[in-house]
Amino acid sequence: MRHLFRLIIFLSFLVGQKSIQSNPISENQIGMASGIFANYGTAGMEVDGYFEVQGRRGLFLESSGIAQLGEQMTLNTSLGIMNEVAPDILMGGGYSNYLEIDNDVLHEVFFGASSSSITGVAFIGLGSELSPNYLGTLNLNSFFPFLSIDSSIMCILSKEMDEFGYDIFFNMSKTIGSGLSYGYSLSSERYEDEERRTFKKQGHSKTFTVTAQGLFISFFIGWTF
């Protein structure tokens, strides 16, 4: 759930970058974007949304949330700055917190850079979780401009349950003029699973929680405005 949430946050971060690249916001103007989506796949049904404000001199504020029906809800708020440092290259950083209802708040700082073809972000936890997490995306449309849909490959590198691993996402989406968006995601993700082992000497078994890798499919439809 944590990685899916970060994925959505990152996608909306890229939407903001794309809008700046194609239609730069004047220093005297403020831009806003928001959206709400319904997702259904092998992991179940989820509803998520985001709200983003782009201010003067590259400042931005973004708040996002995901509700997994029948289970839990997560909230995230990010505050930072991003600016063009060279033609077609944006760099930025800021602060982000992650809240899973009924659990502690995770505080992080992040740094990233983006071009028309590739984007990378590093998240560093503040407090007990100092292990950095890395997130990168490859924009396939920059290599195949004839594609009629938005297509990308995204990878997350992070430490889960004392094991360093990865999650990979292949995303396809389409947004029409009215703001209606729909798409598909195929991913290989880690998840917590239970493994039962039998000890021969004691003659009994015990259940352990382990990290497993699985294939997930998700479809989404939503509205951006």
Image: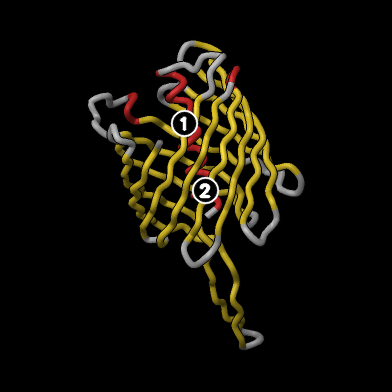
Q: Which mark is residue 14?
A: 1
Helix, strand, or loop for circle 1? Answer: helix
**Which residue occupies the foreground of this view, 197 or 83?**
83
Report the residue that reaches farthest toward the bottom: 203
Image location of residue 164, percent across then percent down: 59, 49
- Residue 59 appears in which quarter of the rendering? top right
**Which residue occupies the foreground of this view, 35 or 117?**
35
Return the residue at label 2: 5
Q: Is residue 78 left or right of residue 41?
A: right
Q: Residues within 10 Å of mark 1 (few under 14, many from 20)?
A: some
**Residue type at the position of mark 2:** Phe
The image's colouring method is secondary structure
**Residue type at the position of mark 1:** Leu
Q: Residues within 10 Å of mark 2 (few under 14, many from 20)?
A: some
Question: Which residue is painted at 32% across and 44% down in the image?
Answer: 183
Distance, label 2 to label 1, CA atoms, is 14 Å
Q: Is residue 102 left or right of residue 19?
A: right
Helix, strand, or loop for circle 2? Answer: helix
Image location of residue 114, percent across then percent down: 50, 24
Decide which of tag 2 and tag 1 comes sooner along the chain.
Answer: 2
